[in-house]
Amino acid sequence: MIDPAKRQEGWLSEHFREHEMACPCCGRYTDNRALLSSLESLRSLCGNVPITATSAYRCERWNGVVGGSEQSQHLLGRACDVIVQGLHPLEVAAKAELVPLFSHGGIGIYDTFVHVDVRVGGPARWNG
């Protein structure tokens, strides 16, 4: 749980802020505890190096602009695309498999980033 004073400054967790989890179109952000906790676990497994969240919550309009799936977990605030400083996406995906909610959720590997999500209904894996 984040300190209330830090929360008032826009922090959602120890290392992630509202603006990082926000849709560039509408500004709405995800504060999904399961996602944020899993991102913190991933950061720890990656040696506590910074994780850049490139896309988290998306409104329907923005999801369409970026070509996201109509069933995207981003629309539900359960997903985040990440870049981990100094690690290749394959390395990040392997670390994500060690995070329980990501291993039971979604992990998608792309050329420059990894999609992770805390979906319900079973794991999903893909290469973008």
Image (spheres, rainbow, N blue to C red):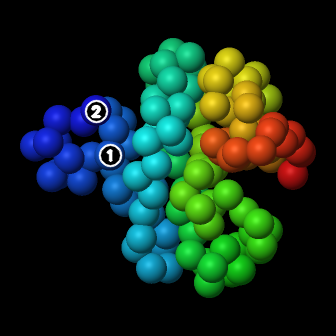
Q: Quadrant of the N terminus?
A: top left
How far across and how far down the image is residue 18, in percent? 35, 56
Residue appearing at x 40%, y 73% in the figure: 27
- Looking at the image, residue 123 sits to the left or right of residue 26; the answer is right
State the residue position of label 2. Answer: 1
- Looking at the image, residue 104 sits to the left or right of residue 4; the answer is right
Please tell me in which quadrant of the rendered image residue 45 appears: top right
Q: Work out whether residue 109 or residue 30 is closer to the camera in this orientation and state it.
A: 30
- Of the numbered discs in the image, which one, if any, rests on residue 12? 1
Q: Work out whether residue 10 or residue 75 is closer to the camera in this orientation and state it.
A: 75
- Residue positioned most to the left: 5
Q: Is residue 64 above or below residue 81?
A: below
User: Dot 2: within a 10 Å radius of its alpha carbon, few (fewer than 14), some, or many (20 or more) residues?
Assistant: few
Q: Is residue 50 above or below residue 58?
A: above
User: Dot 1: within a 10 Å radius of its alpha carbon, few (fewer than 14), some, or many (20 or more) residues?
Assistant: many
Q: In the structure shown, which secondary structural element does the residue marked by tag 1 occupy?
A: loop
Q: Amino acid at mark 1?
A: Leu
Residue appearing at x 73%, y 28% in the figure: 103
Residue appearing at x 72%, y 38% in the figure: 105
- Residue positioned most to the right: 127
How far across and how far down the image is residue 71, in percent? 77, 66
How far across and how far down the image is residue 100, in percent? 65, 24
Q: Is residue 61 above or below residue 117?
A: below
